[in-house]
């Protein structure tokens, strides 16, 4: 779904493993920088384009046993009420969908 300037994704695994994480993302209203972090370490920073074309984001990731949190950050956000002239006053930055991860051997 749509996010404001930050969001997180939780991944639980019973055993440590190396995975490849991927998802689709698009920026709302204007191009902006999009960053993915794990434990305050930058994993991926991309220039995310606005419009209707989603970008596929993907990277390898080391998961520890138990809960693992990925933090997503976008540079700024915009209100649809100001951009499109409607009544939606949420502050939106990016939309993320299609989250997947696959174990790497």
Image: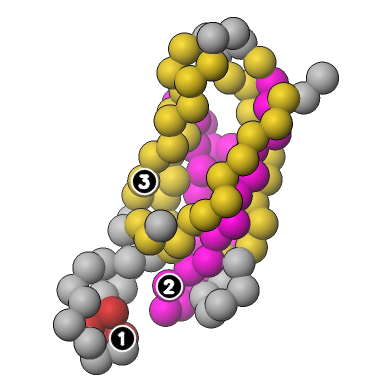
The segment highlighted magenta reads: 18-47
Q: Residues within 10 Å of mark 1 (few under 14, many from 20)?
A: few
Circle 1: element type: helix
Residue in the picture at 35% in, 57% down: 3
Query: Which type of secondary structure does the marked residue at label 3 adopt?
Result: strand
Is residue 40 visible in the rendered image? The answer is no
Magenta segment's dominant SS is strand
Q: Residue furthest bottom?
A: 85
Which residue is pictured at 48% across the width and 20% down the height? 12
Q: Where is residue 61 shown, x and y percent of the image?
A: 64, 28
- What residue did someone put label 1 on? 83
Q: Real-space Cα distance between discs 2 and 1?
A: 10 Å
Number of dots carrying numbers: 3
The answer to whether residue 68 of the structure is visible from this angle is yes
First in sequence: mark 1 vs mark 3:
3
Q: Are marks 2 and 3 in contact (CB under 8 Å)?
A: no
> Which residue carries the number 2 mark?
28
How far apart marks 1 and 3 lie (CA) works out to 22 Å
Residue 78: image x %, image y %? 30, 73
């Amino acid at each position: 779904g749509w996010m404001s300037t930050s969001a997180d994704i939780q991944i639980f695994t019973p055993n440590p493993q190396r995975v490849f994480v991927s998802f689709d993302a698009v920026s709302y209203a204007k191009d902006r920088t999009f960053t993915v972090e794990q434990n305050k370490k930058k994993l991926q920073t991309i220039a995310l384009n606005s419009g209707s074309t989603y970008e596929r984001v993907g990277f390898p990731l080391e998961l520890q046993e138990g809960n693992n949190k990925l933090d997503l950050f976008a540079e700024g956000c915009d209100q649809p009420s100001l951009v499109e002239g409607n009544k939606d006053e949420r502050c939106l930055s990016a939309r993320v969908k299609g989250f997947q991860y696959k174990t790497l051997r």
